[in-house]
Image: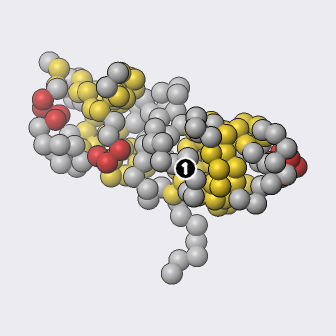
Amino acid sequence: MSVLPPPLTLVGKIHSKHGYDGRLSIECFATSNKIISKGNYLFVIIDGKGVPFCITDVNKTKELIKLKGIDTEEKAKNLIGLPFGVPSSAKMSVIPQDNALVGFTITDETSNFTGVISAVEELPQGIMFSVEHPETKNTVLIPLVESWITRIEEKQKHIYMQLPEGLVQLNETP
């Protein structure tokens, strides 16, 4: 059994306290609504280390949360401005609002296609990556489907996916 904390993927930031009972106002960049849910753990980065807190309550818009052990205004004030994350082993995607994934490399483990994200677009059917093949300069649209992501290596700016067979060839633009 390992007692070391898991590697973390940063997914948001604590903006302010809300009220006097320790409730916090947050901004979460994750596209998955499952991350900010009652009973899940967030790892708040305190002094460079991820400290786990269980979410005990969350509002409908997922902007206000209550963490176990943070039950006073003073305790909440100590967390203002701190980032938080979730274990990197979880299959999840993080899309900051400022298109911070532009420039990341995507590798499809099914077809061995590799390309660089040139844009992240929010379309009515969902979020799409515009991925440019570095040699042919062809652009491929890849939908963001959480279950297709096998891992994200933030430091290397690399996303590994298992795309359905033929997807890359289907929507390649000449």
Q: Report which quarter residue 64 is drawn in.
A: top right
SS type, badge 1: loop
Q: Quadrant of the C terminus?
A: top left
In this rendering, position of residue 133 left or right of residue 16? left
Can see residue 49? no
In this rendering, position of residue 9 left or right of residue 89? right
Circle 1: residue type: Ser
Q: Where does label 1 land, which residue?
A: 37
How many numbered circles are shown? 1
Can see residue 62? yes
In this rendering, position of residue 123 left or right of residue 24? left
Q: Residue at x 77, y 55 (%)?
A: 70
Q: 123 or 19, which lies in front?
A: 19
Task: Give how far across and how far down residue 27 sits, in percent.
Answer: 62, 36
Task: Give how far across and how far down residue 8 sits, in percent.
Answer: 54, 55
As drawn, 67 above or below 132? below
Q: Residue at x 58, y 67 (%)?
A: 5
Query: Residue reaching furthest bottom?
Result: 1
As drawn, 77 above or below 42? above
Q: Report which quarter residue 54 is drawn in.
A: bottom right
Q: Assess disc 1: are there few (<14), some (14-19) or many (≥20) residues with their C-alpha within 10 Å of its C-alpha.
A: some
Q: Report which quarter residue 89 is drawn in.
A: bottom left
Task: Give how far across and how far down residue 58 sits, in percent.
Answer: 62, 45
Q: Residue at x 29, y 33 (%)?
A: 143
Q: 8 or 123, which lies in front?
A: 123
Q: Residue at x 16, y 25 (%)?
A: 172
As drawn, 147 above or below 133? below
Task: Give how far across and how far down residue 52 sits, in percent.
Answer: 64, 61
Q: 99 or 36, which lies in front?
A: 36
In this rendering, position of residue 92 left or right of residue 87? left
